[in-house]
Image (spheres, rainbow, N blue to C red):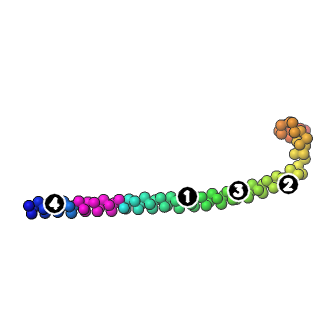
Amino acid sequence: DIFQSHEEDDRKVRRREKNRVAAQRSRKKQTQKADKLHEEYESLEQENTSLKREIGKLTDEMKHLSEVLKDHEKICPLLHCTMNFVTIPRPDALASCLPR
């Protein structure tokens, strides 16, 4: 009986050790997974910030170009000419205004 009891104790100790190692491995794996997700998150945040900056620049450029176009439309003789031919598609109207 003492032999059996000792054997059971050994099995329990081995099982506990095996469980401890498995739990440690599991925690390590979860930590690595969390670290990887955090790195991905940081990378996406940086990309998002960069894209927002780029959108801001493009928006400013679009506003500027719209103002330039508006100013140009006021003085462009071709555009004034095409306004007289509203029923004609724009490329034809422009062609009719161009010098030959």
Q: Main SS type for the magenta part?
A: helix
| Chain part drawn in magenta | 15-26
**Mark 1 vs mark 4: which is more N-terminal?**
4
Q: Name which residue type carries label 3.
A: Leu
Please give the residue where the numbered disc 4 appears in the rendered image: 8
Asked if the residue at tag 1 contacts the one at tag 3, i.e. Cβ–Cβ closer than 8 Å, the answer is no
CA gap, disc 2 and disc 3:
20 Å
Tell me the tag on residue 44: 1
**Picture coordinates of residue 82, whole percent (x, y):** 88, 42
Per the model, the C-alpha gap separating discs 2 and 4 is: 93 Å
- SS category of the residue bearing label 4: helix
Q: Which residue is pictured at 87% across the width and 39% down the height?
A: 86
Q: Nearer the viewer, mark 3 or mark 4?
A: 4
Mark 3 surroundings within 10 Å by alpha-carbon count, few (fewer than 14), some (14 through 19), many (20 or more): few
Residue 90 image offset from top left, x and y in percent: 83, 39
Q: Secondary structure at mark 2?
A: helix
| Dot 2 and dot 3 residues touching (CB under 8 Å) | no
Give the spatial CA distance, label 3 vs label 4. 74 Å
Q: Please give the residue where the numbered disc 2 appears in the rendered image.
A: 71
- Gap in angstroms between the C-alphas marked 1 and 4: 53 Å
- Residue of label 3: 58
Q: Could you tell me which secondary element the residue under label 3 belongs to?
A: helix
2 on left or right of 60 = left
Of the residues shown, which amino acid type is indicated by label 2? Asp
Chain-order first, disc 1 or disc 2: 1
